[in-house]
């Protein structure tokens, strides 16, 4: 595909999203209907779409509209690309720019447009992050780092980095977690490396790894909202720990047995009834459903689909999860709460509300991880009765 054809594909996908189709579904539909597109073409189109989603408001400003064509014009203009080279009408490229489209507007001055955030969330964003709000908002507009978790039960990071380099995957140490390596070249080769296939590495954000590394120790640990099981796998790097995983939707853990086997770990998956039967646990981790605002670089669509009503609903879900999980914690055990959110309403406020509801519990530790070149925005708190 030519650069112009890739832009046309991105325009098509963005327009389908305007009709309510989720980004991943729109990308999948396009890929299935475009068998001629190679892996590099699919990756380039995906990059176009997600670059727009991360900077949708400023792209609309510089493109003069909200449809796919305007958004792509605006995004490419922000990137300093040669618009005529992409919009030339040749082959499958978009039609040339009109006179109106050639007129570039002045830089935006509205704060929410510059920060690329919805208007309604600006007050909560600034309250939650204070003097870091602008830096975080701008960090969320760039692509997220690709980070590996080294399976410390099998290998050491320095050795893994050297062996990955031999397979043309270049990394650097990540200061957020001992087990973390940030990929600086060759990210599309990771799943084909011998280290990945032998369970010596997994893809996992560094802040997510650090949440696990900071957890209190315990012989029996439950990952209560396991999702795909990434944190359960990280916990299971310690062979002395018996690890259990539960999720309200067991389908999310469908590939966890295969991943655990590859890593050489044992993780016991529990349904709702079995969780009660196996309780109590020394440590219960609640990586609760949240806005995902700390990871909007990876799931940029969520920035625009989140509503105030949904945020309120999420905080109620988070309270319910904490209340239920508290009953699963052994005497002298720990309840660990975590989100990939930067919003105070989902983090510190939930801990305050929990302590107000549960006499005898205290918060021993809480920490925020910044959105930066090393990792996503996370929050974690350790509670004890």
Image (cartoon, grey):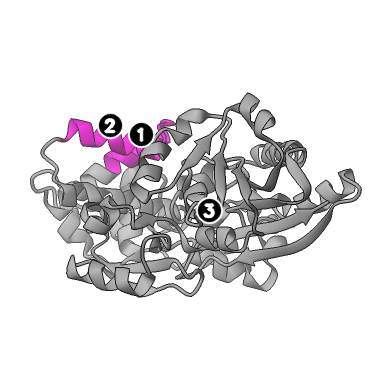
Circle 3 is placed at which residue position? 235
Magenta-drawn stretch contains 138? no
> What is the crowding at mark 2: few (fewer than 14 residues within 10 Å), some, or many (at least 20)?
some
Number of marks in the rendered image: 3
Magenta-drawn stretch contains 13? yes
Tell whether 32 sits left or right of 140: left
Q: Are marks 3 and 2 in contact (CB under 8 Å)?
A: no
Query: What is the quadrant of residue 10 in the picture?
Result: top left
**Circle 2: element type:** helix
Tell whether 205 sits left or right of 42: right
Q: Earlier in the sequence, mark 3 or mark 1?
A: 1
Q: Earlier in the sequence, mark 3 or mark 2?
A: 2
Q: Which residues are magenta?
A: 11-34
Position of residue 67 relative to residue 176, above or below, is above
* Magenta stretch, overall SS: helix
Circle 2 is placed at which residue position? 29
* Label ID, residue 25: 1
Q: Is residue 140 visible?
A: yes
Question: x, y (%) of residue 42?
Answer: 21, 46
User: In 3D space, how far apart are the residues under numbered discs 1 and 2 (Cα atoms)?
Assistant: 6 Å
> What is the crowding at mark 1: few (fewer than 14 residues within 10 Å), some, or many (at least 20)?
few
**Circle 3: element type:** helix
Q: Which of the two residues, 172 or 96, is positioned nearer the viewer here? A: 172
Q: Which of the two residues, 310 or 100, is positioned nearer the viewer here? A: 310
Question: x, y (%) of residue 328?
Answer: 73, 39
Q: Which of the two residues, 357 or 157, is positioned nearer the viewer here? A: 157
Identify the residue shown where x is 55% and y is 57%.
294
Residue lying furthest top in this view? Answer: 273
**Circle 1: element type:** helix
Question: x, y (%) of residue 178?
Answer: 48, 70
Q: Are marks 1 and 2 in contact (CB under 8 Å)?
A: yes
């Amino acid at each position: 595909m030519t650069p112009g054809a890739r832009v046309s594909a991105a325009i098509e996908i963005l327009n389908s999203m305007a009709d309510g189709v989720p980004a991943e579904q729109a990308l999948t539909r396009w890929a299935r209907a475009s068998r001629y597109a190679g892996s590099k073409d699919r990756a380039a189109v995906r990059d176009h779409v997600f670059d727009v989603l991360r900077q949708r408001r400023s792209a609309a400003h510089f493109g003069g509209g909200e449809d796919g064509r305007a958004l792509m014009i605006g995004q490419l203009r922000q990137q300093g690309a040669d618009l005529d080279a992409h919009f030339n009408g040749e082959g499958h490229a978009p039609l040339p720019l009109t006179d109106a489209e050639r007129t570039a507007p002045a830089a935006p001055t509205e704060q929410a447009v510059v920060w690329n955030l919805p208007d309604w969330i600006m007050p909560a964003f600034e309250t939650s992050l204070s003097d870091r709000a602008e830096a975080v908002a701008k960090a969320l507009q760039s692509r997220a780092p690709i980070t590996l978790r080294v399976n410390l039960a099998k290998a050491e990071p320095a050795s893994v980095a050297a062996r990955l380099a031999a397979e043309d995957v270049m990394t650097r140490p990540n200061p957020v977690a001992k087990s973390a390596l940030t990929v600086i070249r060759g990210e599309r080769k990771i799943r084909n490396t011998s280290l990945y296939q032998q369970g010596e590495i997994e893809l996992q954000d560094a802040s997510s790894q650090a949440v696990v590394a900071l957890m209190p120790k315990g012989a029996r640990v439950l990952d209560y909202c396991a999702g795909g099981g990434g944190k359960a796998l990280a916990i299971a790097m310690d062979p002395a720990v018996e690890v259990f995983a539960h999720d309200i939707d067991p389908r999310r853990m469908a590939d966890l047995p295969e991943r655990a086997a590859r890593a050489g770990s044992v993780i016991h998956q529990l349904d709702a009834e079995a969780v009660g039967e196996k309780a109590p646990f020394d440590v219960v981790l609640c990586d609760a459903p949240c806005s995902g605002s700390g990871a909007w670089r990876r799931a940029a669509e969520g920035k625009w689909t989140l509503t105030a009503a949904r945020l309120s609903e999420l905080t109620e879900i988070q309270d319910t999860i904490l209340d239920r999980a508290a009953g699963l914690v052994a005497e002298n055990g720990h309840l660990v709460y975590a989100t990939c959110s930067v919003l105070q309403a989902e983090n510190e406020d939930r801990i305050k509300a929990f302590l107000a509801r549960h006499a005898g519990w205290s918060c021993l530790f809480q920490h925020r991880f910044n959105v930066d070149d090393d990792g996503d925005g996370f929050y974690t708190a350790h509670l004890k009765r």
